[in-house]
């Protein structure tokens, strides 16, 4: 039995959902399954005890009893990285920790899935990139990739070269309707001609590629100022209201599934945004409450207003991080990804990488 390492060309490709959906499929087929994420990067705190949500979700979905430090032996925090740079970490000991904990997890298991961290190059400072990890644990690799344009193939081919013979194949995830035909008719045949196996492509679905207004508010700790406005609309992108009213109105009218981020004191931008049907909420920064007229108009149109204390730049960064992650870390998402996998690819063929 070889472990299956799920890696990616970039962050936010759906590694957690795909990894756990594969593991869930194997478990449902009666196989004993193990999970490991050797480098924990999704930390709620930069120091101290790891709070990476991915192994915790794996424990819940797969009914595992391994301790967190076994499933995730390296807490890849900013503090850890700094200590490595200062020469205060023993790389041999780190490698031994990974192999020893993997052996504990793999004992008596039919399948072990390993989740990569960030993108496949993460971990270079400790000689534990995903290609290094594949060599260390004798793993076969499933490489996830996004696809927006042909130039994205540079990253796919670079990753294929890095993994070499350990690459089992590529799976494209979250492919939009606009790009699906090009991917299947041109891109996948091109890669296969270059000797790269492609398992298939999973289409983009809104419930996995976006977050609801309510989820956005919760993640940002925002106050919802419009009590009656529904918060179940999906947000996929952000527009920054930093221009004049006429320019803003023109841009907002072309928006789809967007949140407009602007200062709480920019009433003209807020009013323009509320006139655009594709704007699903206003995200106001600086702690400045909008006028009663703006709140009233928002309630009439059913457009929620969220208020945060942070500045616009910080809010943009945090909000984009929330949407990039999407709803990829709950049991319902894993179940939905399992359905998409079954429809799009040969799941048993993917699991056969570990045989």
Image (cartoon, helix red, strand yellow):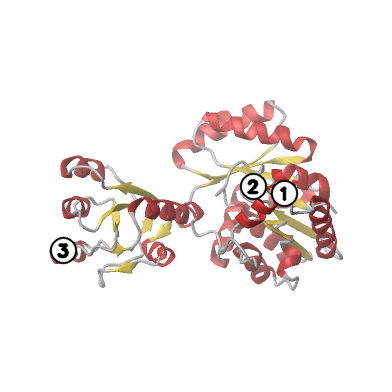
User: On the picture, is 127 further left or further right than 21?
Assistant: right
* Label 3 SS: loop
Q: Earlier in the sequence, mark 1 or mark 2?
A: 2
> Any mark on residue 350, and which?
1
Question: Mark 1 to mark 3: distance in Å?
Answer: 55 Å
* Label 1 to label 2: alpha-carbon separation: 8 Å
Toward the viewer: 346 or 334? Answer: 334
Q: Relative to residue 246, is residue 198 drawn left or right?
A: right
Label 2, residues with CA under 10 Å away: few <14, some 14-19, many ≥20: some
Sequence-first disc among 3 and 2 = 3
Q: Which mark is residue 291?
A: 3
Please tell me which residue lies in front, 84 or 111: 84
Tell me what residue is drawn at x 24 percent, y 52 percent: 277
Instruction: Give percent across and percent down for residue 64.
Output: 72, 71
Q: Secondary structure at mark 1?
A: helix
Q: Nearer the viewer, mark 3 or mark 2?
A: 3
**SS for callout 2:** loop
Mark with earlier residue (1, 3): 3
Where is residue 251 shown, x and y percent of the image?
A: 25, 41
Q: Residues within 10 Å of mark 3 (few under 14, many from 20)?
A: few
Q: Quadrant of residue 142?
A: top right
Q: Mark number for residue 340? A: none
The image shows residue 14 at horizontal and vertical percentages of 57, 52
Q: Is residue 108 left or right of residue 68?
A: right
From the image, tell me which residue sits under label 2.
Answer: 345
Q: Is residue 349 visible?
A: yes
Q: Are marks 1 and 2 in contact (CB under 8 Å)?
A: yes
Residue at position x 34%, y 55% from top?
311
- Does the image show residue 129? no
């Amino acid at each position: 039995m070889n472990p299956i390492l799920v890696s990616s060309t970039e962050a936010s490709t759906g590694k957690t959902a795909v990894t756990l959906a594969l593991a869930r499929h194997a478990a449902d087929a009666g196989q004993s399954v193990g999970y490991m994420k050797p480098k924990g990067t999704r930390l709620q705190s930069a120091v101290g005890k790891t709070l990476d949500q991915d192994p915790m979700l794996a424990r819940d979905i797969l009914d595992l009893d391994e301790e967190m430090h076994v499933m995730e032996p390296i807490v890849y925090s900013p503090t850890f990285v700094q200590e490595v740079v200062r020469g205060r970490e023993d790389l041999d000991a780190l490698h031994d920790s990974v192999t020893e904990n993997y052996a504990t997890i793999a004992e008596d298991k039919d399948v072990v899935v390993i989740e990569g961290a960030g993108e496949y190059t993460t971990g270079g400072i400790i000689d534990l990139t995903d290609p290094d990890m594949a060599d260390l644990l004798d793993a076969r690799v499933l490489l996830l990739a996004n696809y927006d344009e042909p130039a994205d193939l540079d990253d796919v081919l670079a990753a294929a070269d890095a993994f070499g013979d350990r690459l089992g194949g590529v799976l494209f995830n979250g492919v939009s309707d606009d790009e699906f035909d090009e991917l299947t008719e041109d891109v996948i045949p091109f890669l296969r001609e270059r000797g790269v196996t492609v398992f298939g492509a999973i289409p983009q679905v809104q419930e996995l590629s976006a977050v609801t207004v309510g989820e956005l508010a919760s993640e940002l700790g925002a106050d919802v100022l419009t009590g009656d406005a529904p918060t179940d609309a999906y947000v996929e992108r952000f527009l920054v209201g930093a221009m004049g009213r006429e320019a803003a109105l023109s841009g907002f009218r072309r928006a789809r599934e967007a949140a407009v981020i602007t200062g709480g004191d920019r009433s003209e931008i807020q009013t323009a945004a509320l006139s655009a049907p594709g704007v699903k909420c206003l995200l106001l920064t600086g702690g400045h409450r909008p006028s009663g007229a703006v709140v009233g108009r928002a309630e009439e149109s059913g457009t929620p207003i969220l208020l945060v204390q942070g500045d616009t730049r910080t809010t943009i960064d945090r909000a984009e991080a929330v949407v990039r992650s999407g709803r990829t870390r709950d049991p319902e998402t894993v179940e939905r990804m399992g359905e998409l996998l079954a429809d799009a690819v040969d799941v048993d063929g993917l699991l056969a990488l570990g045989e």
